[in-house]
Amino acid sequence: MKIRTVFAGLVAATFSAIAMAQAPIVIKFSHVVAVDTPKGKASEFFAKKAAELTKGKVKVEVYANSSLYKDKEEMEALQLGAVQMLAPSLAKFGPLGVKEFEAFDLPYIFDNTAELHKITQGPVGASLLAKLEPKGIKGLAFWDNGFKSFSANKPLKSPADFKGLKMRIQSSKVLESQMRSLGALPQVMAFSEVYQALQTGVVDGTENPHSNLYTQKMHEVQKHMTLTEHGYLGYAVITNKKFWDGLPGDVRGQLEQAMKEATVFANSIAKEENDGALEKIKASGKTQVYSPTAAERTAIKKALVKTHTDMESRIGKETIQAIYKETGFDPAKL
Ligand code: LMR
């Protein structure tokens, strides 16, 4: 009887050891946007690729739409190891103490995606990601979203139209300065709270690429939108460094490959997703979409370019100059 009990115990222990040895490594990937957006689709793509390339050794669980954490909490959760992966917008790294990322928020710093990719896919981008390491964070990739439009319940055609408007921004001092240079009152707010804040009038307006505006239904509570393309919004995919460094080498290599492929995918769909969202916003008839004239565009640019000098000491002259050098941007020419 005794021998039988010992034997049964041994069998149970062996089975649970095998089960444990085969239990997948779980990566919780939290983000704040809808599934039907460039980031939403790219994170699902990464999850599928990771399962495929690791042959099931890794299971990536994607939590979209702030279902696990909101903006600020998700950064803390990553550092504490409660989640393993995030893709916050580049405008959200200031509170972490990595102010250089706010260079991406400078108005009109990129004329197009090709210029942006000189940074995100080149040495400047790599050196920016390296700045995360002392914070216990490993930067894996940059993912595109797109260029932003302004929205409000009144037409926004000239800088004077922004005066006194409460405009929701992400937690970036550059965006704060941008709104102030238009005479608006910036209000930092988590992405998950913006729709309601617009609906109830807590804020008057906002800015985002069209895929975000559309999937959060912000256009349903904003009467006007102006296609200013005044700034860029994109992401850094990040992981907890200790977690990443602790992965078996072969698994880490397979995940790096999955991330490479997910990045190509993200960047190939971003423009299409935003163009499609703009068409749907127009078709909804809920927002009047305005394309500024050349003269109106110039007036808005002239009002906003001051942000570059105002924010130089915060971001660091070196980072700003490195970007100008790669892209050929010259604020004096605006
Ligand atoms: C926002 O907060 O406006 C965006 O950064 C959300 C996102 O992740 O695209």
Image (cartoon, rainbow, N blue to C red):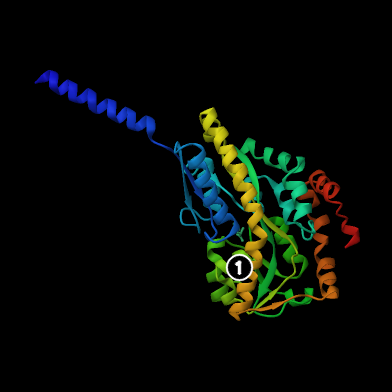
Residue at 55 percent of width and 55 percent of height: 41
In front of the other: 120 or 251: 251
In front of the other: 293 or 92: 293
- Does residue 205 appear anywhere in the picture? no
| The image quadrant in which ligand 1 is located | bottom right
Q: Please, what secondary structure does the residue beneath circle 1 have?
A: helix
In which image quadrant can residue 229 be found? bottom right
In which image quadrant can residue 278 be found? bottom right
Residue at 52 percent of width and 59 percent of height: 35
Q: Residue 197 appears at what percent x and percent y?
A: 55, 70
Query: Does ligand 1 reach within 8 Å of label 1's beta carbon?
Result: no
Amino acid at pointer 1: Leu
In which image quadrant can residue 279 be found? bottom right
Q: Residue 317 appears at what percent x and percent y?
A: 82, 46
Left or right placement of residue 312 versus residue 235 in this view: right
The C terminus sits in image quarter = bottom right
On the image, numbered disc 1 is attached to which residue? 213
Q: Residue 263 appears at what percent x and percent y?
A: 63, 47
In front of the other: 210 or 332: 210
Pick out the residue farthest to the right.
Answer: 333
